[in-house]
Amino acid sequence: MDILYLLKLEQIDLDIISQSNKLIELYYIKEYLNNIELKGRSDIFALNLLSSAKSVGFNRGSLTFTYICSRCKGKYPIYFHRCPNCNSVFKIGVEILVGEKNEERDNSLL
């Protein structure tokens, strides 16, 4: 879900999205789709929350992702293959959180 959420509009196929309620809600939250009609709600609470909020005019919410090592339970803001804490390999889980939308774009540290 984190990879799909970070895609730009020109990188997605709207025909594939129309077959999944999760993807419809995800891209409705990203403002790639307008006036959606869901056949049923997705089973992801964060998507339901943000799509309901957006439908009543609250557009400041966004999804954020935290990556968790399933062995030591360490939490990190970026994806990893080897846990920086316990050095376990491929023991990663993704936690989907609701946060505030960040409007900054194309930032550079230089």
Image (cartoon, helix red, strand yellow):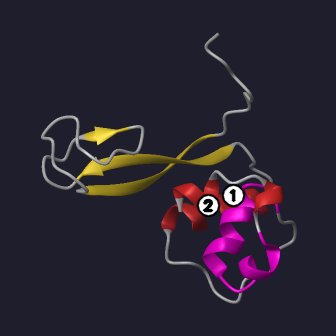
| Mark 1 secondary-structure assignment | helix
Disc 2 target residue:
4
Q: Amino acid at mark 1?
A: Ala
Q: Choose between 104 and 92: the one closer to the eye.
A: 92
State if disc 2 and disc 1 touch (CB < 8 Å).
Answer: no
Q: Which mark is residue 53?
A: 1
* Quadrant position of the C terminus in the picture: top right
Q: Choose between 98 and 107: the one closer to the eye.
A: 107
Span shown in magenta:
13-32
Q: Residue at x 69, y 57 (%)?
A: 53
Q: Residue at x 32, y 58 (%)?
A: 93
Question: Does residue 109 sit above or below 3 in this rendering?
Answer: above
Q: Main secondary structure of the magenta part?
A: helix
Rendered image quadrant of residue 38 = bottom right
Tell me where residue 47 appears, x and y as whole percent. Answer: 58, 64
| Mark 2 secondary-structure assignment | helix
Tell me where residue 102 appears, x and y as whole percent. Answer: 67, 34
Tell me where residue 90 appears, x and y as whole percent. Answer: 25, 56
